[in-house]
Structure formats: C-alpha cells, structure tokens
C-alpha cells in the first residue's frame, strides 16, 4: 500500500483524520503529496487498529487530528497502535485552510494531512499520559459540582430577596446552616417547600464532591512530591496544587516561564502597528480551571502577612484590585513553574519583594466619657494634668516611657 522510493525503501506516509463520535474520515498521502488511500473507520479501538491491518500503514506514521471532544481518546489509541498522533488546535486548522469556505469531513482530513506533511502547524496540543488525564477529568468533575452547589445557594438567596427576606440570606455551606434557615422560614410554607428542593440538589452535589475528593486523594500519591512543594506557597492548597500539576503535566515542554504564562492565558493581548501600541485584556487561552485556581490563590495576597502583599499593594494602587489579582496570579504561575522545573523548595527570599514577617499597625480612637466617669478613676502623669500615656494608648509597649517636661 505504501509506495517505494527509487532505492527500494518505503516512502514516508502522512495521515489526516477528521474525528467524530461515531466514525472518522481519513486521508493518507506520501512524501510527494500523492494520495495513497482514504476511507472511513469507526471511532473505536478496533477501528484504529484497522489502519494498520487493513490499509497497511506502517508504525511511526504521523496522524494529524484536530482538537475536539474525542481528540485525546483517539490520540491514545493511535499511540497504542504505534502511530505518532499530532493533535492540532482547531482554530489554527481553520485559519490555515486553503479552502475555508468549502468545509466537509473529507476536506478537513485533506487539510490536516497536507498541513502535517508540510509542517505548517505550530499549536500542537500536548497529550498527557493516562494518569494525568484522569486527574484532569476528576478535577473538572469536582469543579462542576462545586459550581452546582454555588448556583443552588445563589438561587435560594435570590428567592429570599424577592420575598423581602434578605436578612435571612446568609452563608449556606453546612447542613446546620440549612436547618437553621428552614426553621426560620416556618411562617412561609411555600418558600420553605422551594427551599427543600434546592437543598436536595445541594446535598446531592455535596455528596458527589466528597466522592471525587476521595478519588483525588488516591491520585495524589502519584504526585506527592510536587504537590508537597507547591503547597508551601501561601494560598496554595491541595486542589490548587493538583490543578497546576495536571495543567502543566510535563514542564520540560515549556522553554521558559513566559511560555507558561502565555499557555495559561495570563498575558495581555497586544496590538502594535507603526507608532501605535496597545495592550488589552488577558488572552484567556488554555485551561480556564487553571486560571480560576490561580486567581483564587492570588486573592490571599491582599492580606498584609502574605509575601506578595507589597507587590499586590503597589499594582492595586496604580491599576485597581482586579488587575492586581491577575498580576499576582501570573507571578504565582511563574513561581510554580520554576519550582516544578528545578525541583526546589519555596523560598521567600527569592521573590524579589520585601521579606516578612510584616508589621501590622492599627490605630484606635477613644471617646472621652463624661466628667463624673473621669473623676472616679483619674490617671495622670506625674507633673502634668494630662492623662497618662497608658490611658490614651493602652496598646503601647511597656518599656516606652516618655521623658517629663
């Protein structure tokens, strides 16, 4: 099936495959661009195996597929058959198509085959191993049910506000809080029945979250060492650490920290032409779960004792809270990448900001009581009629005495 060169050696073949849920359309070409074979196979392990047994494609043949729902499934089974899968971003495939207005399954397969043969694709998606892919899916399912819990709580708060019961809309994160709200709404039986419906969905989602977290505990054993190092970063917990490890997967595929930030979509979009240069919002490319987890960890930088609080405060004063949060999330990602690549521990002294611990100063104001209350317990300094320093500033240090006039 594969043509021969002049010296008798087989010619290298390239395959473009348009993958769908039920079947795949593929086209194979030789090095010279001549079509070797085309056809349809089932989207299953048996269908991918027939590429070698039925159509005679050799092991090591590059097979290009575009991103989609079953792209990773097809890539894993193609790799098991000895092929070299190349997963390309679907946006790039459409932008570089020679006939963008003539779209069909066969035309997409031809475009993929010609693109991988000529090597014009740059946005090649990394295919993680089976364990990392399972970790990604488990984290994604957990985040789905957490969002479902949040939606139910927000729906209950909206219902209470619509009925003029905004004072009852408090945090509903535990069963005790739901029980207390149910008792306080005894005077409104209709809203109490609706509350029971929302609570049933919330309880079901909470049970699924607990089940998925137990599965995450088992997966954590494969990534115990990197997760332990990442959790030393202030604001990083088990979920944030696992999300970073799952999203980055093999850190050796990134040349520098700038590429990691671009991969996560935490860099500003740029438009430069002539003398005009404009930087807009972040690109938001890559994993949205990774950006969400990093931003949640970045909110902790608003606390005075956080190591990145001086950096956060400086950006917040100039550009606002939201941009400061994104800037801290960008920096946390670069720190995480450096720790995973070098295998080192978290060191506050290498952050390039002021070192802690930081001093927290609070100012307290006191109101003077009436004359009768002041006359009962006068506290004055020797040689003056003014109140003593301890009475005016009780939080002052014990050894800071003021010289008398």
Image (cartoon, grey):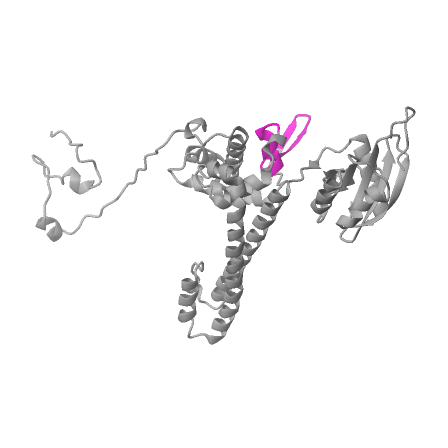
Q: Quadrant of residue 309?
A: top left
In the image shown, does 104 or 38 lie closer to the viewer? 38
Residue 295 visible (yes or no): no
In the image shown, does 189 or 163 lie closer to the viewer? 189
Q: Residue at x 64, y 44 (%)?
A: 130
In the image shown, does 7 or 180 lie closer to the viewer? 7
Relative image position of residue 331 (x, y in whole percent): 51, 33
Residue 196 visible (yes or no): yes
Q: Residue at x 41, y 34 (%)?
A: 307
Horizontal side, residue 33 vs residue 217: left or right = right
Horizontal side, residue 17 vs residue 189: left or right = right
Q: Residue at x 50, y 40 (%)?
A: 224
Q: Is residue 257 magenta?
A: yes
Relative image position of residue 288 (x, y in whole percent): 60, 44
Tell me the quarter of the image containing the C terminus.
top left
Q: In this view, which residue lies farthest toward the right?
A: 6
Q: Is residue 140 above or below residue 248?
A: below
Relative image position of residue 214 (x, y in whole percent): 51, 52
In the image shown, does 280 or 10 lie closer to the viewer? 10
Tell me the quarter of the image containing the N terminus.
top right
Q: Which residues make up the magenta segment?
A: 255-278
Q: Is residue 275 magenta?
A: yes
Q: Quadrant of residue 80?
A: top right
Horizontal side, residue 284 vs residue 39: left or right = left
Q: Is residue 178 above or below residue 84?
A: below
Q: Residue at x 76, y 50 (%)?
A: 44
Relative image position of residue 314 (x, y in whole percent): 45, 33
């Amino acid at each position: 099936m594969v043509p021969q060169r002049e010296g008798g050696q087989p010619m290298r073949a390239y395959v473009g495959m348009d993958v769908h849920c039920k079947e795949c359309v593929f086209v194979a070409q030789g090095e010279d661009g001549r079509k070797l074979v085309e056809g349809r196979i089932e989207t299953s392990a048996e269908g991918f195996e027939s590429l070698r047994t039925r159509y005679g494609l050799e092991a090591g043949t590059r097979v290009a597929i575009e991103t989609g729902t079953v792209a990773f499934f097809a890539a894993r089974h193609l790799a098991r058959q000895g092929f070299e899968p190349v997963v390309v971003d679907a946006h790039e495939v459409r932008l570089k198509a020679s006939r963008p207005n003539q779209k069909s399954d066969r035309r997409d397969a031809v475009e993929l085959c010609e693109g991988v043969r000529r090597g014009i694709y740059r946005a090649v998606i990394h295919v993680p191993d089976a364990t990392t892919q399972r970790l990604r899916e488990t984290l994604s399912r957990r985040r789905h049910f957490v969002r479902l819990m949040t939606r139910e709580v927000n729906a209950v708060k909206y219902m209470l506000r619509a009925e003029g019961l905004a004072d009852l809309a408090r945090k509903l994160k535990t069963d005790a809080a739901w029980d207390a709200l149910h008792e306080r709404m005894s005077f409104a039986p209709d809203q109490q029945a609706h509350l029971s419906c929302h609570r049933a969905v919330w309880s079901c989602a909470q049970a699924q979250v607990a089940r998925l977290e137990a599965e995450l505990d088992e997966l954590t054993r494969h990534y115990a060492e990197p997760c332990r190092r990442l959790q030393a970063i202030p604001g990083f917990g088990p979920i944030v650490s696992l999300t970073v490890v799952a999203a980055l997967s093999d850190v050796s595929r990134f040349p520098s920290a700038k590429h990691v930030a671009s991969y996560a979509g935490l860099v500003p979009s740029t438009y430069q032409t002539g003398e005009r240069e404009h930087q807009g919002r972040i690109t938001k490319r890559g994993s949205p779960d990774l950006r969400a987890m990093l931003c949640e960890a970045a909110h902790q930088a608003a606390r005075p004792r956080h190591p990145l609080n001086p950096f956060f405060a400086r950006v917040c004063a100039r550009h606002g809270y939201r941009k400061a949060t994104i800037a801290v999330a960008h920096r946390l990602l670069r720190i995480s990448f450096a720790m995973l690549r070098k295998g080192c521990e978290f060191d506050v002294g290498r952050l390039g900001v002021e070192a802690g611990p930081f001093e927290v100063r609070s100012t307290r104001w006191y109101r003077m009581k009436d004359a009768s209350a002041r006359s009962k317990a006068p506290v004055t300094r020797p040689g003056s009629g003014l109140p003593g320093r301890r009475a005016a500033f009780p939080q002052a240090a014990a050894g800071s005495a003021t010289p008398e006039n």
